[in-house]
Amino acid sequence: MKLRYFIIVFIFFLLAACGNSNDSATGKKPVYVKPSIDYKGKFRKGHVRMPVSTNKNAIKNQNRSRYYYHTRGKYRRKK
């Protein structure tokens, strides 16, 4: 009787572990974009496109960072 429960729990554990390993469907891996030539004939270098953040504060942090680098630091226009 205990063996039967152990087997059922073990099978359930295996199915749960296999179900969560499918990262390619969620799109959370970085993707390499191959070099190409655009419609004007300019060469575009290859680069790594990072995955989209699932953090709920991602847009807020992005805007805060953009504001910081536009108003301070080496990117600010010298007057």
Image (cartoon, grey):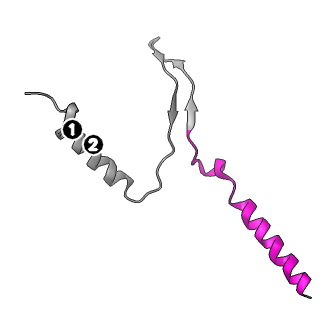
Residue 8 sits in quarter: bottom right
Find disc 2 in the rendering and name its residue: 66
Q: Callout 1, which amino acid?
A: His
Q: Is residue 30 above or below residue 54?
A: above
Magenta-drawn stretch contains 20: yes
For the record, the magenta segment spans: 2-30
In the image, residue 50 sits, relative to residue 43, either above or below, namely: below
Q: Residue furthest left?
A: 79
Q: Main secondary structure of the magenta part?
A: helix
Q: Secondary structure at mark 2?
A: helix
Q: Which residue was labeled with disc 1?
A: 70
As rendered, which of 44 and 5 lies closer to the eye?
5
* Residue 10 locus on image (x, y percent): 82, 73
Q: Does the stretch in magenta take in 14?
A: yes
Q: Are marks 1 and 2 in contact (CB under 8 Å)?
A: yes
Work out whether 40 lies above or below 2.
above
Q: Is residue 42 left or right of residue 5?
A: left
Instruction: Give amino acid for label 2.
Output: Arg
Decide if residue 16 is on the left or right side of residue 27. Answer: right
Q: Is residue 74 left or right of residue 25?
A: left
Q: Secondary structure at mark 1?
A: helix
Label drawn at residue 31: none
State the image coordinates of residue 56 (x, y, percent, origin top left). Answer: 41, 60
